[in-house]
Image: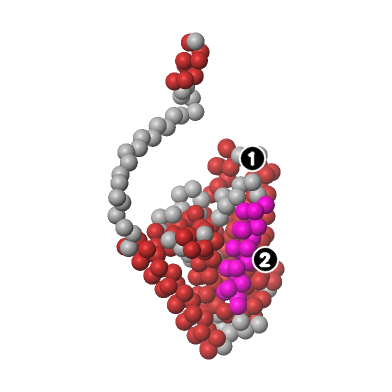
């Protein structure tokens, strides 16, 4: 078991990385590490402690979208639900990871943690009118090598990588599994990410140069700026 200050520090660190690693202007590299503090302490606390840590860190991290949602989409009660429901689901995901890890399966724990969240994102895409709007993969728009993965498996592949990476690190560092099991996980995860990044780099450097160029123009108007056609309609 760990002390309350360590538990609190883990939640604060995870929520801070989620806050700045996601949202409208994400620092993409933070997203890869965001769940790690909570996953490291999950097997060292009870069920409720692990669930609360996961749910709270996600809820606090989602505050980065509140101003945008409140001013553009929904009233406060709906925004609260928009944050609270995914937070509870993330807490359940942490519990799933903890359950497999305590049974001595670090590889299954890491895979289940990533797969469960990707499955939730896919269900949300099918059922929600907002589609893939909250998908974690959008945080990686500036990380071009991993972005190439969408050509094979879509945005779901990026989300899977984002969650598998910290889960594999946490599982390898945990004392709950055997040394052999953790070595196998480290080798498998390392080979997987080398393949992902290798494919991305190869795709970027092997892209053929464009044969033709097209000049395009973009005009943006503010909310209070009248369009020319509107003025013409009024004058007519």
What's the distance in space between the residues labelled 2 and 1, CA to CA? Answer: 26 Å
Mark linked to residue 74: 1
Residue located at (58% from left, 45% from top) = 66
Q: To which quarter of the image does residue 124 belong?
A: bottom right
Mark 1 Cα shell of 10 Å, populated few (<14), some (14-19), many (≥20):
some
Q: Is residue 83 above or below residue 50?
A: above
Magenta portion: prevailing SS class: helix
Residue 126 at what x, y percent from top left? Answer: 65, 53
SS of the residue at dot 1?
loop
Residue 21 at what x, y percent from top left? Answer: 48, 57
Task: Between residue 204 and residue 140, name the one nearer to us.
Answer: 204
Query: On the rendered image, what quadrant is the N terminus found in?
Result: bottom right
Residue 148 on the magenta segment: no
Which residue does the numbered mark 2 point to in the structure image?
Answer: 92
Asked if residue 13 can be seen in this view, the reply is no
Q: On the rendered structure, is 67 left or right of 231?
A: right
Q: To which quarter of the image does residue 178 belong?
A: bottom right
Residue located at (55% from left, 42% from top) = 68
User: In the current view of this chain or complex, which residue is farthest to the front?
Assistant: 211
Q: Is residue 188 above or below residue 220?
A: below
């Amino acid at each position: 078991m760990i002390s309350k200050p360590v538990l609190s520090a883990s939640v604060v660190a995870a929520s801070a990385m989620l806050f700045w690693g996601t949202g409208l202007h994400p620092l993409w590299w933070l997203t890869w590490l965001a769940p790690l503090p909570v996953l490291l302490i999950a097997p060292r606390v009870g069920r409720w402690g692990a669930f609360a840590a996961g749910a709270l860190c996600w809820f606090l991290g989602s505050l980065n979208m509140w101003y945008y949602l409140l001013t553009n989409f929904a009233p406060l009660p709906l925004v609260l639900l928009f944050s609270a429901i995914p937070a509870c689901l993330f807490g359940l995901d942490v519990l799933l990871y903890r359950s497999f890890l305590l049974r001595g399966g670090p590889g299954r724990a890491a895979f289940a943690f990533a797969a469960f969240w990707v499955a939730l994102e896919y269900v949300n895409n099918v059922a929600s009118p907002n589609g893939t709007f909250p998908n974690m993969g959008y945080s990686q728009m500036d990380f071009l090598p991993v972005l190439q993965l969408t050509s094979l498996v879509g945005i779901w592949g990026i989300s899977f990588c984002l969650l598998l990476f910290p889960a594999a690190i946490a599982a390898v560092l945990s004392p709950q599994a055997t040394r052999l099991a953790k070595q196998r996980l480290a080798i498998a995860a390392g080979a997987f990410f080398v393949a992902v990044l290798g494919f991305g780099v190869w795709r970027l450097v092997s892209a053929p140069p464009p044969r033709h160029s097209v000049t395009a123009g973009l005009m943006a108007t503010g909310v209070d700026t009248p369009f020319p056609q509107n003025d013409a309609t009024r004058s007519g």
